[in-house]
Each structure stands twice: as structure tokens, then as C-alpha cells.
Image (cartoon, helix red, strand yellow):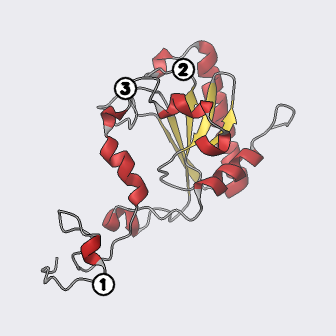
Amino acid sequence: MQENTGAGYPGDAGVTDDFDLAGVPDAFQRLWTPHRLAYIKGGQHQFKNENDCPFCVGPGRTDEEALIVHRGKTCYVVLNLFPYNPGHLLVCPYRHVPDYTDLTVEETAEFAEISQTAMRVLRKVSNPGGFNLGMNQGVVGGAGIAAHLHQHIVPRWGGDGNFFPIIAQTKAITQTLDEVRQLVAEAWPGETDAE
């Protein structure tokens, strides 16, 4: 890393933090992802109950506001606010339960069915080469919101893991969440559509 001579770039003083990040010239320029700050600052314990849980509050909002692409009987599908790739979806039960084993038989069946449909829809709208599906259970298991069960469905393409996440700890997303939500929601099969 280069020594900070204080010269920097124009405007750096206004955006350099206490750790001298971003304003300190080095071999790499910074890509700003300020939208992630709320997530990082909130931490694991930011959601204490159903009243402040985003997965409980979301269904009470419009689909566009909450980024919901499909509402089922016991579960729904929402875009991840901090996606790993465009089209990163979350399947959530409406009930505020933390563990997969807490789901009823009916919820488990719809959870699985919606996950399969989400994969079919993503194949239709964006033709991914593969998927990562997963549930992180509990704080120790890596769940960002451990109090409310959710499954990640991440579409993958060859070469989608470039140098940004490794060097800049930043993922370049080429579409807005609103655009992705609209594409996925419009492609989601209706009650009468054949899958």
C-alpha cells in the first residue's frame, strides 16, 4: 500500500473515514456501495421481533415497495436487498420462525414448490448456468437475519465471480432491483399457467 502523502484525489477529504479508507490512494480505486452500510451497521441483533423483522413487515407493503415477486398461501418470494447476483431471491414463510424444522408440513411443501418455481422463472428470464440454494440456520450458521427463516436462490453464470469481490469486496450488479423484480414477477406463472 502506498504511503498517504495527503495529496489524495480532489474531494477525498469529504469522504475519507476514520480508517483512512477510500481517500488514501493506493493501487486500487474504491467502488462505493453505500447502500450496504445500513446492513453492516445494523448487525445480527437489529431485528428483535416480528414488529421490526423485514420478512414480517414486507408482506404488509406493496410488492414494488417490498420487492416481492410472488405471494403464496404460506410463503412468499422477495428479491434480496443485497444480492450476490442479479435475480438473487429469498423464499420466506409468512410466519416468524427461525428454523427449517419449525415449518408445518403445508409450509414445507409450498416452500419447496416455490423454490422450484423460482428456479424455473430465473431460467426463463435470465438463463443462468446454475444456482446456489441455501439456508443459513442461526447466528453461528451465518444467517444475516436468524430470527426469520429464509432460503437463498442465487442464479449463477460462468465467469460471474470476477475480481471485484476478491479485491474490492464489491459485487457489480448490472440491473436495478426494481427492473429485476418486474422481470421475475411478470414471468411468474399464474394460477392457470402451466409450468
- Res 74 → quadrant: top right
Q: In this figure, which residue is indicated by the disc labeled 1?
A: 10
Residue 89 in the image, given as x and y percentages of width and height: 57, 43
Q: CA distance from mark 2 to mark 1?
A: 50 Å
Of marks 3 and 2, which one's residue comes earlier in the chain? 3
Residue 123 in the image, given as x and y percentages of width and height: 68, 51
Q: Secondary structure at mark 3?
A: loop
Q: Amino acid at mark 2?
A: Arg
Q: Amino acid at mark 3?
A: Lys
Q: CA distance from mark 3 to mark 2?
A: 15 Å
Residue 121 in the image, given as x and y percentages of width and height: 70, 46
Q: Secondary structure at mark 2?
A: loop
Q: In this figure, which residue is indicated by the disc labeled 2?
A: 95
Identified at 36% across, 53% down, the residue is 37
Q: Secondary structure at mark 1?
A: loop
Q: In this figure, which residue is indicated by the disc labeled 3?
A: 48
In the image, residue 50 sits, relative to residue 193, either above or below, namely: above
Residue 43 in the image, given as x and y percentages of width and height: 31, 40
> Given this view, does label 3 or label 2 mark the residue nearer the observer?
3
Q: Is residue 4 visible?
A: yes
Identified at 31% across, 46% down, the residue is 41
Q: CA distance from mark 3 to mark 1?
A: 42 Å
Q: Is residue 163 left or right of residue 128?
A: left
